[in-house]
Image: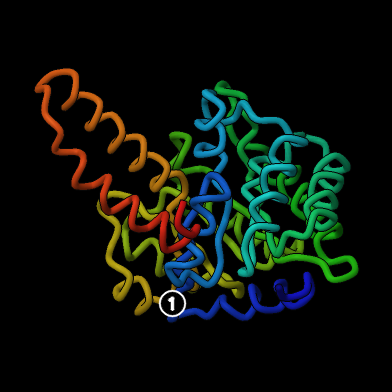
Amino acid sequence: MPSFAAKVDAFRALHVPGRPLLMPNPWDVGTARLLAASGFPALATTSSGFAATLGRSDGSVGRDEALAHAATIAAAVDVPVSADLENGFAADPGAVFDTVGGAVAVGLAGCSIEDFSGDPRDPIYDIGLAAERVAAAADAAHRDAGLVLTARAENYLHGRPDLADTIARLQAYQAAGADVLYAPGLRDLDDIRRVIAAVDRPVNVLALPGLAGVSELAAVGVARISVGGAFSAVALGALHRSARELLDAGTFGFLELAAEGRALMATVFGAS
């Protein structure tokens, strides 16, 4: 298995504008191993997908749980793993420093910190505090072998579709030391192009309905595309459809998909 430093270097090198890294989000060891075996060169945890495995909603997992989960995923595969660390599990920059330091300590190649406050009345941190939080995260991320820090501007996920403010935030996070910039929720190709033109760091986008395809995103300079909790939701959707078929129709059409899954288990995990 590659060394921690080698994984960090490999992960950093995968961020090439115009040649986007396709980075899926497993939610347990099995899905991480399957996605790595499928050929993805890097993976990221998903806060919503992991929370669902515990029967909880997104945002309900604590820092220690998230770091332990991410460490387990990272130890299970040879490829670099980045962790979704939500808002660092704290408003205070010092506590965010500790969270990212924990990510370095458990062997992650990257992590993300967002500016969502968790307060529905005022969901986005003031830009000054948000930049201080990114600076603290960058301080922790760039010590020793370090890791690749992604700073997220959450406006578009929380009812604030303000492109000018989003760009100003990403520029502030770049100045604070972020390695990758991310504004999940952007769908319009022109908006994405404007963001990329306004910053000097690789830009990540989130796969969403209505988003342009990979080739079009590559053409405007996107460096990374992630799916967030979508694959986890796909798995739950397939399970629910299969359950409803059995309960409502009394048929077994789902067994065709199950055969595909069993074949994957045998290939990736070894015969039972």
Closer to the camera, 186 or 107? 107
Q: Position of residue 176 (x, y in %)?
A: 76, 61
Q: Position of residue 33 (x, y in %)?
A: 53, 59
Q: How is the image coloured?
A: rainbow
Closer to the camera, 17 or 270? 270
Q: Position of residue 240 (x, y in %)?
A: 28, 29
Q: Which residue: 39% across, 48% down? A: 231
Residue 4 appears left or right of 52: right
Residue 114 appears left or right of 260: right
Question: Callout 1: helix, strand or loop?
Answer: loop
Q: Hey, which quadrant is residue 243 in on the image?
A: top left
Q: Position of residue 197 (x, y in %)?
A: 49, 74
Residue 261 seen from this side:
yes
Q: Which residue: 82% across, 36% down? A: 92
Q: Hey, which quadrant is residue 170 in on the image?
A: bottom right
Question: Split into 4 quadrants, where in the image is the N terminus?
Answer: bottom right
Q: Hey, which quadrant is residue 229 in on the image?
A: top left
Residue 196 seen from this side:
no
Q: Residue furthest front?
A: 272
Closer to the camera, 239 or 246? 246
Where 265 sits versus 80, above or below?
Answer: above
Instruction: Give amino acid for label 1.
Output: Gly
Mark 1 Cα shell of 10 Å, populated few (<14), some (14-19), many (≥20):
many
Q: Which residue: 80% across, 61% down? A: 141
Q: How many numbered marks appear?
A: 1
Label 1 sits on residue:
221
Q: Which residue: 84% across, 71% down? A: 145
Where 30 sits versus 91, above or below?
Answer: below
